[in-house]
Amino acid sequence: QLQLQESGPGLVKPSETLSLTCTISGGSISNNNYYWGWIRQPPGKGLEWIGSMYYGGSTYHNPSLKSRVTMSVDTSKNQFSVKLSSVTAADTAVYYCARQSRAAYVPGGEFDYWGPGTRVTVSS
Amino acid sequence: QSALTQPASVSGSPGQSITISCTGTSSDVGAYNYVSWYQQHPGKAPKVMIYDVSDRPSGVSNRFSGSKSGNTASLTISGLQAEDEADYYCSSYTRSVTLVFGTGTKVTVL
C-alpha cells in the first residue's frame, strides 16, 4: 500500500524559505505513470495546487506562485521536495503531498494518494 | 489563475439526491475531460471520488457520479447518507498546463 508522508518545520519566519519533503513508501517515485504534487490549504479555506513534477525532471507550477517555488526529486531516497521562498503570513497552511495520475503526459490527472498533511505557520 | 466556481453549500435529507456544480471556462473545464472531484472530512486529507469527469475509482460508492456540460461539471450524490457530510472540491486541467481547484462546497445532511 502506497504511503506518503510530509516532513518539515512547522514554523517559518516571514521572508524566509519554507522547505518540505515528501517520503514515499510502498512504491517507487520512478514510476512512469505518475506525477508527484504539492497542494496546500490555508486555515478555513479551499485547496490550492502548488505544482507537480515528474521524476524525470519536468515540473509544473501554479503561476501565482511560480517565481517563489522550486521543486525537486531525490530518486535515491524516494523523496520529492518543495521550497517556497519569501514567505508571508498568507503562506500559512496545511501542505499536502500527493501522487497524481500522468494521464496523457500532462498534469491533469487525479491525485489518488495523499499524505496526511503538515501544518506550516509563518510567523516571527 | 482563478478558482473554479462552486456553490458554498448544498444540503439534503438522507436518501435524497444532491448535485454540486463546478463552473469554469473554455480554457479549463470546457477544454478537457480532466475534471476530478474530492471529498474532504474535517482534519483529513482529500479523497478522490471521481476522475476524468465521470470515472469512479475502485472502492468509491456508485452513489457518486460525475458529468460535464460545456464549461460546467457536476457531481451528483444519490441516496444521501450521513457519512457524505463533508467538503467537496472539483479540479480541472487548464490550457496553461496547470491545475486549478474549485472554491469548495460544504455538503450538509439534514
Image: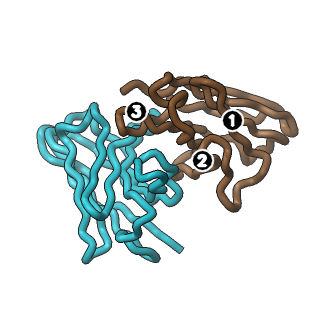
Chain colours: A cyan, B brown
Where is A119 relative to B1, above or below? below
Q: CA distance from mark 3 to mark 2?
A: 18 Å
Q: Nearer the viewer, mark 3 or mark 1?
A: 3
Residue under the point 37% across and 58% down: A36
Residue under the point 84% across and 42% down: B79
Mark 2: secondary structure: loop
Looking at the image, is mark 3 or mark 1 earlier in the sequence?
1
Q: Residue A47 appears at what percent x and percent y?
A: 45, 39
Q: Is residue B27 left or right of residue A120?
A: right
Looking at the image, is mark 3 or mark 2 earlier in the sequence?
2
Q: Quadrant of residue B23?
A: top right
Q: The disc labelled 1 sits on which kind of residue?
A: Ser
Of residue A94 and residue B91, the one placed in the foreground of this image is B91
Do marks 3 and 1 both belong to one polypeptide chain? Answer: yes
Q: Which residue is mark 3?
A: B95
Using the image, name the chain to which the residue with label 2 belongs.
B
Q: Nearer the viewer, mark 3 or mark 2?
A: 3
Where is B17 relative to A34, above or below? above
Q: Is the residue under label 2 in contact with that under label 3 (CB below 8 Å)?
A: no
Q: Is the residue under label 1 in contact with that under label 3 (CB below 8 Å)?
A: no
Q: Which residue is mark 1?
A: B67
Using the image, name the chain to which the residue with label 3 belongs.
B
Looking at the image, is mark 1 or mark 2 earlier in the sequence?
2
Query: Does residue A9 appear in this view?
Result: no
Q: Is residue A27 left or right of residue B20?
A: left
Q: Which residue is mark 2?
A: B51
Query: Does residue B96 appear in this view?
Result: yes
Mark 1: secondary structure: strand
Q: Quadrant of the N terminus of chain A?
A: bottom right
Mark 3: secondary structure: loop
